[in-house]
Image: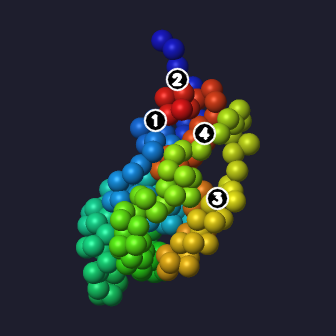
Amino acid sequence: MKTLKRCSWCESSDLDREYHDTEWGKPVFDDRHLFEMLILEGAQAGVSWHVVLQKRAHYKKLFANFDVKKTSRFSDARLEKILTDPGIIRNRLKIYSVRTNALACMKVQKEFGTFADYIWSFVDGKPIINRWKHASEVPAKTSISEAMSKDLKKRGFKFIGSTICYAYMQGTGMVNDHVTDCFRYHELK
C-alpha cells in the first residue's frame, strides 16, 4: 500500500493530518468559515495550531458556530463567562476580540457585499500557487500578509498581525503552501 506524501508539519497526529488533508490550503469563500478561521488563527498566537484544533469544536459551541451577527451582540457578561471555560484558550484579549472582529466584519460586509469579496481582494480573487520543495522555504509572512494586516487593523480588527494573516491565507486557501511533493499540492493546484 502506497503511503501518501504530506507536508511535514502535519505528521504528528491524526487530528493534524485530517486538517491538512481536508482543509488546509483549500480555498474558502464562505463568510462564516472565513470568520471562524480568522478567530482561530488569532487564538493560536502563542500556542500551537494542534491545541487550537483540539479546542475548535468547543469554540464553535461557545461562539454560536462563529455566526458574525450573533457574536457581535455578545455582552461583556457572556464574554466573561466564556473566559472561565477551560475548553478554550482563556485569554481575555483574544476572547473579547471575537466580538470586536464580528463588528468589524459586519462593517466590511456592508461595504464590500461579503467578507469573502474583501479578503480575497488581497490576492485578486484567486489562490497564489507557490512551489516550495521544502517546508523550510515557506515564509512566515509576506508583503501581502503585511498589507492585509495593516488594512484589517485600520478597520478595527484585533489579533491579525502579519504572521497571523499569512497563516490565515494558508488555512483558507488564499495561498497554496503545500510542498510540491505533497499529494494535496497537486489536488489544490
Of labels 3 and 1, earlier in sequence is: 1
Of labels 2 and 1, earlier in sequence is: 2
Residue marked by disc 4:
129
Residue 96 numbered mark, or none? none
Q: Position of residue 153 (x, y in %)?
A: 56, 76
SS label for mark 3: helix
The image shows residue 187, relative to residue 78, as above or below, that is above
Going by the numbered disc 4, the residue's amino acid type is Ile
Residue found 36% across the figure and 65% down from its top = 113
Which quadrant of the structure image shows residue 148? bottom right
Q: Give how far apart the Cα atoms at labels 3 and 1 are.
A: 25 Å
Are the residues flagged by discs 2 and 4 in contact, CB closer than 8 Å? no
Q: Position of residue 61 (x, y in %)?
A: 27, 63
Residue found 46% across the figure and 35% down from its top = 21
Question: As rendered, which of 40 and 80 lies closer to the eye?
Answer: 40
Are the residues flagged by discs 2 and 1 in contact, CB closer than 8 Å? yes
Residue 4 numbered mark, or none? 2
Residue 144 numbered mark, or none? 3
Report whether 60 appears left or right of 42: left
Structural crowding at the residue carrying mark 1, measured as other residues with C-alpha within 10 Å and reported as few (<14), some (14–19) or many (≥20): some
Going by the numbered disc 3, the residue's amino acid type is Ile
